[in-house]
Amino acid sequence: MSRTMSLRTLLNDNTRSAAPELIRREADRHGGAAAIRCLACGHRCLIRDGRAGVCRVRFNRGGELRVPGGYVAGVQVDPIEKKPFYHAFPGRDALSFGMLGCDFHCGYCQNWVTSQALRDDAAVSLPEFCTPEQIVELAVEHDAPVMVSTYNEPLITSEWAVDVFKLARERGIVCGYVSNGNGTPEVLEFIRPYVDLYKVDLKGFDDKHYRELGGVLSNVLDTVRRLKAMGFWVEIVTLVVPGFNDSDDELRQIADFIASVSPDIPWHMTAFHPDYKMQDVRRTPAEALLRAYDIGRQAGLRFCYPGNLHGSVGERENTRCASCGETLIRRRGFYVEENRMGPHGACPKCGARTPGVWETTAPRCSDGDGVPRPVRLR
């Protein structure tokens, strides 16, 4: 038996029922148990008895959709800037946790050991079974005001995230998703009472390339629009991959789209490094990120952040007041060296408020040293 088959058996024995809001029962024309339309991601898989969806982790067993629950495949405390969120709780730590599986299969995935664990025997990441209470207590213990579902695609494990986030909100913790954005109206409505922060990985603006990764561009764009309309705090990241999505034309289309939704959405353009199945592609040079930055600013985006090449992009990692240009947050990589914002994001010079999710009494610099810290469940 392959390692993925053994892992699938283990996970299938430790699942929970899907949320009623995320399924629709449909007649099975083949006469078996009822087929189920899964609404957790944009694939909207019709899953017949004994079969799984594209994600491999949501499956039909005897007419019941079983979904992930009761474990983590990774958990650590690290700077919220690493997610990256630059306009939410600057200088603070976030507790990050993830599960296994993804509805995409990106060849350059930097979290492939968790996202592709049910597709690739080389992806070695074992689950650690736990309760929502254990995860939330970790956040409290480490004084993390934010919890984020990440490492795999959180949309396909939304029931578990909601189980955790319900308890987190009771403790005053703000919750977020780090996601590919392949959503549905149903799943966004399901998570909205518990999720405030949402980072979308907008992988390009070429539908052919998106389909190679396992998605559809228009669905991601619709999700971004819907997230903004529903009041999530949205930040967007584009991993700039040489020869894949780094042309001026494609970067300009991305920037124009974001600006059409809102010029206040922060756009992070980050550097690719060879990983997983794309070991033969060169690293993204700083010049490509600076070019993307200029394109974003020309498109009218007020907050553009080159990332992953810290020290090579000048002061562009800093947050400046869009009204007067005053430096509000000065960063060195994921470390906040200085936070000069007033309450609710007010500029100390002109008083204009920068959009974001700000603390009334935020730390003036990072609480920690900017180094991720694996933590243990108890």
Image: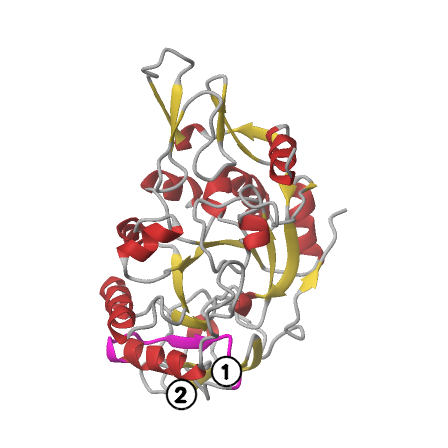
Q: CA distance from mark 2 to mark 1?
A: 10 Å
Q: Was residue 303 drawn as part of the magenta stretch in this picture?
A: yes
Q: Would you say 87 lies left or right of 131 here?
A: left
- Would residue 340 be found to the left or right of residue 295 on screen? right
> Which residue appears at 59% of the width and 74% of the height?
363
Whether residue 377 appears in magenta in the rendering, the answer is no
Q: Nearer the viewer, residue 210 or 188?
A: 210
Q: How many marks?
A: 2
Q: Which mark is residue 4?
A: none
Question: Which residue is at 49% across, 68% downward?
Answer: 280
Quadrant position of residue 2: top right
The residue pinned by badge 2 equals: 326
Tell me, yes or no, whether the two marked residues, 2 and 1, touch with CB atoms within 8 Å: yes
Q: Quadrant of residue 9?
A: top right
Amino acid marked by disc 1: Arg
Q: Residues within 10 Å of mark 1 (few under 14, many from 20)?
A: some
Crowding near the residue tagged with mark 2, few <14, some 14–19, many ≥20 C-alpha atoms within 10 Å: some
Query: Which secondary structure class fits the magenta region best?
Result: loop
Q: Residue at x 43, y 73 (%)?
A: 345
Q: Amino acid at mark 2?
A: Glu
Between 124 and 226, which is closer to the camera in this rendering? 124
- Counting from the top left corner in percent of width and height, residue 373 is at 69, 64
**Residue at image mark 1:** 340
Q: Nearer the viewer, residue 184 or 174?
A: 184
Span shown in magenta: 298-311
SS of the residue at dot 1? Answer: loop
Looking at the rendered image, the quarter that the N terminus falls into is top right
Q: Residue 299 in the image: state x and y as whole percent.
A: 24, 75
Q: Position of residue 368 (x, y in %)?
A: 67, 73
Position of residue 265 relative to residue 60, above or below, is below
